Amino acid sequence: MKRSIAAFFILATLIFPIGTFADEGMWTFDNPPLKQWKERYDFVPPAGWLDKVRLASVRLNDGGSASFVSPNGLIITNQHVANGQLSKMSSQTKDYVKDGFYAPTQDKEVKATDLEANVLMSFDDVTAKVQSATDKKAVSAEIEKDCAAKTQLKCEVISFYSGGEYWLYRFKKYTDLRIVFAPEEQISFFGGDYDNFTYPRYDLDITFLRAYENGKPADTPNYFKFSEKGAADGEFIVVPGNPGSTARLSTVAQLAFQRDIGNPLQKKVWETRLNALEAYAKLGEEQHRQASPAIRSLNNSLKRLAGQQDGLLNPRQFGKKEVEEKELRDALAKKPDLDKQYAPAWDDLAKAYAGMSKMAPRLSFSNLAASRLATIATQIVRYTGEIAKPNDQRYDEFRDNRIESFKFALLSSAPIYDDLDEASLTAWLDEAAKTLGTDDPFIKAALGGSSVKDVVHHAVRDTKLKDVAFRRSLLDGGSAAVAGSTDPMIVLARNVEPVIRELRAWNDANVARVESSAGERISKARFAVYGKSIAPDANFNLRLSYGRVKGYEEDTTLVPYRTTFYGLYDRALSFGEMSPYELPQRYKDKLGKFDMSVGLDFVYTADTIGGNSGSPVIDRNAEFVGINFDSNIQKLSNKYWYVEESEGGRAVGVHSAGILEALKNVYETTALLKEIRGN
């Protein structure tokens, strides 16, 4: 009898991978986890439910998610997602990040500098057409161009399951977005980096925007109604959003490369940039204001990376991936015809990544991305080199369907700070020279025998790229204008571009093409064994995650499912309001003058990752019960695998009841509150 049970368990893990029926997966709308919803939570979405959720969900080009919460284009996202826009709109005399903002009437709403919102309108499976083509890139470009001509929408052919599937996504685009409300950064990021990726939390991490069309608030009939009560303990919830990137379907060889080479290099890159920014921020209050958004972002990225790396270094967790891969390959071996066709894919990837080890430092440091001016110059040089080519032969980011968004961002009037740019680029090239050596082709092309200090100072101080009209003239003038330009930043970008293109070509030929070919074969092998019982890796496109509101055990204590405003004041006072636990003045003035017992933040088991920030948390009635803004530290390795509920992995959100209470009695935003409540 024991043998039979054991045999059944082994068979079950091969047919239904462990965790399939946990709250696992970032599911596409073509394959929602309906079976799991029914079996775990007795939820069957009514007709039209999924369409409404999809059309009310928003993707922002700042790298986060959002959602409509009124029929008049009102959008809610996180303050930390909108932080970059708030910073770009700020000045030395008006700081929207530090002081917050509220527009009591629509005519007072302030236009965001270069923010774009996308809504997924429809999608079609184009796998057969793309996979059967000799040139997948060419046929994808053709599909996108034909779609855009027919629909006037933004059309993208998107790869899922590492090339196992291709889908055509059609997006409605909004480029006129205006700020309606943002709280002070101190309350949206209360506790600062110390409390980041921890729980309990006490953050009001929200911002309201409004989408406009033709100068008027957009008509958005699909939106989430705010729940007055908010998320309840044990309640089933769904999180539609745009998770950025996971690597759960990666092979053991790919994960080993990340553990040993990729992540340590990424850490070095981010620390180089962070150290330069922190040194600059110490020069004065204004310098701190200029550098603060990037410092916050990099600290967040480094903390997340540390948690991910800890997971890869954990023999037990990494061992699970080895077992998963062995089980798949063992199951495949029982199908000799498929095994012969697909099994070599694992070896192909292993060889590709072995060859990448030597090239990784060059691929990581051969760029000018630390500087905004240098990034603009690089984009202009690269654009003029690509746009003359046929659409299907260009780099993906310069295909016709992306050009409009590219120009929208490139021609932004957001402020650029010379001193900050010079400090950032100088530190970057100094570290690049140390890492790569002075004889490296990129370093030689960038410096031309001069010192880093001299090259950067001349490029930053004498460039005209801060002038949007000058940027536009280079775009319009094409390759001839760029080739003939004497602008020092354009010259710098032009000098290093051949090296960067050479490295990109090497990567495309030796890694990316292997990943595409091998990934497609491994996906087909996985489909043959498991079907589509596993969600594809995240790729910053709309997904559905789900779970329940639930606290957890940590060591020998219990962690509650929610926090309250009482906890906020207690944490501030317990630290004597020393930084970063000081309260904004309005919160000191409002002490005891509002309902401090309502939920402020809460945790839930939904499978989320970076990019989900700003995602709505909704109940089975598709009502807004909260907004995702973080996860706890137990969950940080979820880039590579789902962190089980029993292990304490939780997403963290702002509670809808707390949002309503703050808007009503702390900020007294009467008009905004009426709109949210449907009055």
Image (cartoon, rainbow, N blue to C red):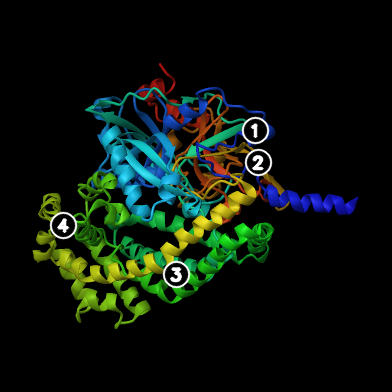
* Residue drawn where x is 38% and y is 57% of the image: 295
Earlier in the chain: of badge 3 and badge 4, it is 3
Q: Quadrant of the C terminus?
A: top left
Q: Position of residue 443 (x, y in %)?
A: 27, 76
**In this rendering, which labeled residue sits more in front, label 1 or label 3?**
3
Earlier in the chain: of badge 2 and badge 3, it is 3
Q: CA distance from mark 2 to mark 4?
A: 51 Å
Q: CA distance from mark 2 to mark 3?
A: 36 Å
Residue holding disc 4: 465
Earlier in the chain: of badge 1 and badge 3, it is 1
Contact, mark 2 vs mark 4 (Cβ under 8 Å): no
Relative to 328, 636 lies left or right: left
Residue holding disc 1: 233
Residue holding disc 3: 265
Contact, mark 1 vs mark 2 (Cβ under 8 Å): yes
Element on which disc 1 rests: loop
